Every structure is written in structure tokens, then in C-alpha cells.
Image (tube, grey):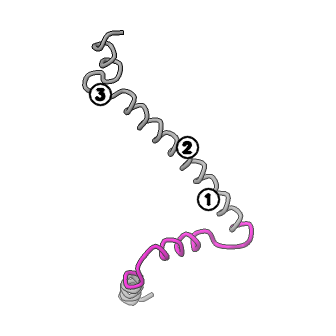
């Protein structure tokens, strides 16, 4: 194999084929892991539901735990204002 053939195999059209293949395969593996994790999360929510917990509320709590306390307080204040404005 001459030098020109080697460089064509490694970089076709200016693209490093091995590097591209590696990147694509890594993304594919991670997508499979994400799919498996999503299934695990679904199973946990099913377990919570069968134990009598409200899954919607659990999801809200998870969302709240990701926020800063000041952000939560601001949202609660606005929610209270909006409820009073609507007579709720």
C-alpha cells in the first residue's frame, strides 16, 4: 500500500474516517445507556405509584430540587399573586 492509499483510508475528503466512526459509536452507546436509564426511571415511578405516591407530585419535587431557593420563592410568590387575581 502506498502513502497515497493510506492517507485516503484515514482521511477521505478531508474527514478522518476512524475519528468520525469513533464519535458516532460513542454517541450510539450513550443513547443506548440513556434508553436503559429511562426504562429504570420509569420502573421507579411505577414502584412509587404502586406504593401509593402521586407520581406527578414526585416529578414536581424533583424539578424543584434542581432550582435555587430564591427561584422557588419567586415562583411561589407569583403563583400566589395569580391565584388571588383569579379569586382562587
Q: Could you say where residue 37 lies in the image, as x and y percent from the top left? A: 59, 53
35 relative to 69, above or below: above
Q: Secondary structure at mark 2?
A: helix
Task: Point out the frontmost of discs 3 and 1.
Answer: 3
* Of residues 39 and 82, the one drawn nearer to the viewer in this rendering: 39
Q: Earlier in the sequence, mark 3 or mark 1?
A: 3
Q: Could you give the CA–CA distance between mark 2 and mark 3, rounded to whole angstroms? A: 26 Å
Extent of the magenta region? 49-72
Is 63 colored magenta in this rendering?
yes
Pointer 1: residues within 10 angstroms few (<14), some, or many (20+)?
few
Question: Which residue shows up at 42% across the image and 84% down it?
Answer: 69
Label 1, on which residue? 41
Res. 32 mark: 2
* Of residues 83 and 4, the one drawn nearer to the viewer in this rendering: 4
Q: Could you say where residue 31 lies in the image, as x and y percent from the top left? A: 51, 44
Q: Could you say where residue 45 lies in the image, as x and y percent from the top left? A: 65, 63
Res. 71 mark: none
- Rendered-image quadrant of the C terminus: bottom left
78 relative to 45, above or below: below
Main secondary structure found in the magenta portion = helix
Question: Which residue shows up at 32% across the image and 10% down it?
Answer: 2
Label 3, on which residue? 15
Q: Secondary structure at mark 1?
A: helix
Pointer 2: residues within 10 angstroms few (<14), some, or many (20+)?
few
Q: Earlier in the sequence, mark 2 or mark 3?
A: 3
Residue farthest along the top direction in this orientation? 1
Q: Could you say where residue 76 lies in the image, as x and y percent from the top left? A: 42, 85
Question: Which residue shows up at 36% across the image and 27% down it?
Answer: 17
Is 83 colored magenta in this rendering?
no
- Rendered-image quadrant of the N terminus: top left
Q: Earlier in the sequence, mark 2 or mark 1?
A: 2
Q: Could you give the CA–CA distance between mark 3 and mark 1, rounded to whole angstroms? A: 38 Å
Amino acid at each position: 500500500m502506498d502513502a497515497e492509499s493510506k492517507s485516503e483510508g484515514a482521511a477521505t475528503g478531508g474527514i478522518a474516517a476512524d475519528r468520525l466512526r469513533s464519535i458516532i459509536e460513542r454517541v450510539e452507546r450513550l443513547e443506548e445507556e440513556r434508553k436503559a436509564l429511562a426504562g429504570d426511571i420509569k420502573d421507579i415511578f411505577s414502584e412509587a405509584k404502586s406504593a401509593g405516591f402521586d407520581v406527578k407530585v414526585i416529578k414536581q419535587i424533583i424539578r424543584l430540587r434542581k432550582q435555587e431557593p430564591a427561584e422557588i420563592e419567586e415562583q411561589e410568590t407569583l403563583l400566589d399573586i395569580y391565584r388571588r387575581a383569579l379569586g382562587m
